[in-house]
């Protein structure tokens, strides 16, 4: 029986959010790559889908965190960080850059996990 890819994405996303939350709670921000890496290895998905699922999972997760952070702390910290970068103090630009970097990291980590699966000859058809 063939699985619905939508449910596979939901499972990938849910597990990514839980593991990423745990890893970033106990360590630095860059531990977000561990969850997509592991899931890219253990899920039976193609490399293209692994990249997309890893990228979208981290983008959605970080987007949610940015919304929570900006509502709790206020937008003053976002403005201050935005002035440090050459984006003329644009909060939206800072958020977009942050989400793109997070998505790229998550996608590349999941892609790396899928390639590890392939290199170990654990490919399922």
Image (tube, rainbow, N blue to C red):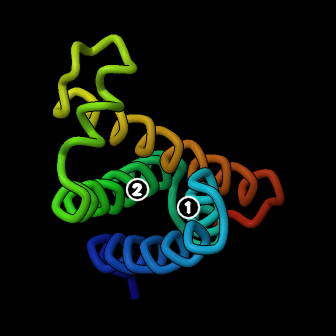
Q: Nearer the viewer, residue 82 or 12?
A: 82
Where residue 81 appears, as percent x and y from the top left, is: 35, 31
Choose mark 1 or mark 2, whichever is in front: 2
Distance Cα–Cα, label 1 vs label 2:
8 Å
Q: Residue 74, labelled with which disc?
A: none
Outermost residue toward the right?
Answer: 120
Where residue 54 appears, as percent x and y from the top left, is: 46, 55
| Left or right position of 16 against 80 | right
Q: Quadrant of residue 124?
A: bottom right
Q: Which quarter shows the N terminus?
A: bottom left
Residue placed at 56% from the left, 42% from the top? 108
Crowd class of label 1 (few under 14; some 14 to 19; many from 20; radius 10 Å): many
For label 1, the residue is: 36
Residue placed at 60% from the left, 49% from the top? 109
- Tell me if I can see residue 71 in this picture: yes
Q: Nearer the viewer, residue 30 or 55?
A: 30
Element class at badge 2: helix
Of pointers 1 and 2, the one earlier in the residue sequence: 1
| Left or right position of 9 against 117 | left
- Tell me if I can see residue 125 in this picture: no
Vertical arrangement, residue 47 with respect to residue 61, above or below: above
Vertical arrangement, residue 87 with respect to residue 7, above or below: above
Crowd class of label 2 (few under 14; some 14 to 19; many from 20; radius 10 Å): many
For label 2, the residue is: 58
Q: Quadrant of residue 57?
A: bottom left
Q: Nearer the viewer, residue 43 or 54?
A: 54
Q: Are marks 1 and 2 in contact (CB under 8 Å)?
A: yes
Q: Which quarter shows the C terminus?
A: bottom right
């Amino acid at each position: 029986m063939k699985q619905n890819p939508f449910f596979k994405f939901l499972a990938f996303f849910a597990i990514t959010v839980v593991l990423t939350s745990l890893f970033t709670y106990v360590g630095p921000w860059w531990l977000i790559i561990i969850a997509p890496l592991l899931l890219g290895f253990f899920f039976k998905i193609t490399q293209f889908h692994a990249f997309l699922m890893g990228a979208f999972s981290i983008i959605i997760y970080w987007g949610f965190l940015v919304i929570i952070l900006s509502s709790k702390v206020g937008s003053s910290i976002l403005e201050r960080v935005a002035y440090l970068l050459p984006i003329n103090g644009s909060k939206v630009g800072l958020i977009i850059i942050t989400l793109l970097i997070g998505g790229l990291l998550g996608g590349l980590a999941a892609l790396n996990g899928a390639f590890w699966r392939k290199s170990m000859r654990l490919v399922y058809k």
